[in-house]
Image (cartoon, grey):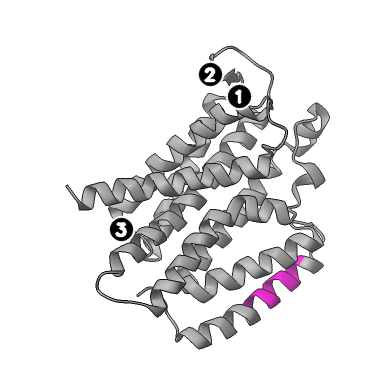
Amino acid sequence: MLSLYDFSNSWLIAVGLNSLLLGIVWLAPKKLLTPAGIINAWLLGVLIWGTLGLPGYTVVCVYFIVGSAVTRIGMTQKEQLGIAEKRSGARGPENVWGSAFTAAICALGVGIIDWLVTSDTVFLSSLLVLGYVASFCTKLSDTCASEVGKAYGERTFLITTLQPVPKGTEGAVSLEGTLAGIFASVVLAIIGWGVGLIDVWGIIWCVFAAFIATNLESVIGATLQSRWQWLTNELVNVLNTLIGAATAILFAWMRANI
């Protein structure tokens, strides 16, 4: 399986490492997480390391670092326009789980399968690992597309009508943002391959799935989010990553059964 360490020891490492790293984040002058966000990120980090070890942890750390950096691009301009992320981009618990709920479910599934491992469950585990990587590729693609589009998009269009709309409009897309999103998903998928979580086909599935899910998320934003108050950005993020993970898993399953 994927674990680099003995199962019991990996959880001890997870607790110690996340306590150290998030303690540094807590003391850092630039607040990337709110206090509640730090606690929830600690829980997420322990789960990821405990189930997927260093490879899985690498993917979530790259997502968090790049996603946080991209959110701060053109922050002054976006704040003036009223389209910046709240709290100057500092993530709260709703942001942590909105981005990582799907990935956490996939990682938990892998951990359970590790306990019950048989020849029949190895393929299922590999599909869940693919879903894990694809969910973060999808979210990073969405974040980069949105933030780069708001900062540098020359023209933004509503995805359902292709009519010009102001930056920051729900469901708006731009060429600059779309290209940034594709690039981000490619980079993170390659990292997932580099650490041994997915194969070369997995890179392709993750990129395609991220593109499909990111555009569907824009459709949801343009058609449903403004109508239903309960459909918050965080819930849309969960749907976005769920679509990305499920799409990548479906691609891999279909290829294996052709």
**Separation of residues labelled 1 and 3 (CA atoms):** 35 Å
Above/below status of 105 relative to 16: above
Q: Is residue 171 visible?
A: no
> Does 211 sit left or right of 39 as displayed?
left
Question: Given the image, on which type of amino acid does mark 2 rest?
Answer: Thr
What residue sits 52% from the left and 25% below the top? Answer: 175
Q: Which mark is residue 222?
A: 1
State the image coordinates of residue 37 (x, y, percent, origin top left): 74, 60
Quarter of the figure that contains the N terminus: bottom left
Above/below status of 79 relative to 138: above
Question: Given the image, on which type of amino acid does mark 3 rest?
Answer: Asp
How many C-alpha atoms fall within 10 Å of the one at disc 3: few (<14), some, or many (≥20)?
Answer: some
Above/below status of 239 relative to 11: above
Q: Which mark is residue 199?
A: 3
Question: Are dots 2 and 1 in contact, CB under 8 Å?
Answer: yes
Above/below status of 224 relative to 241: above
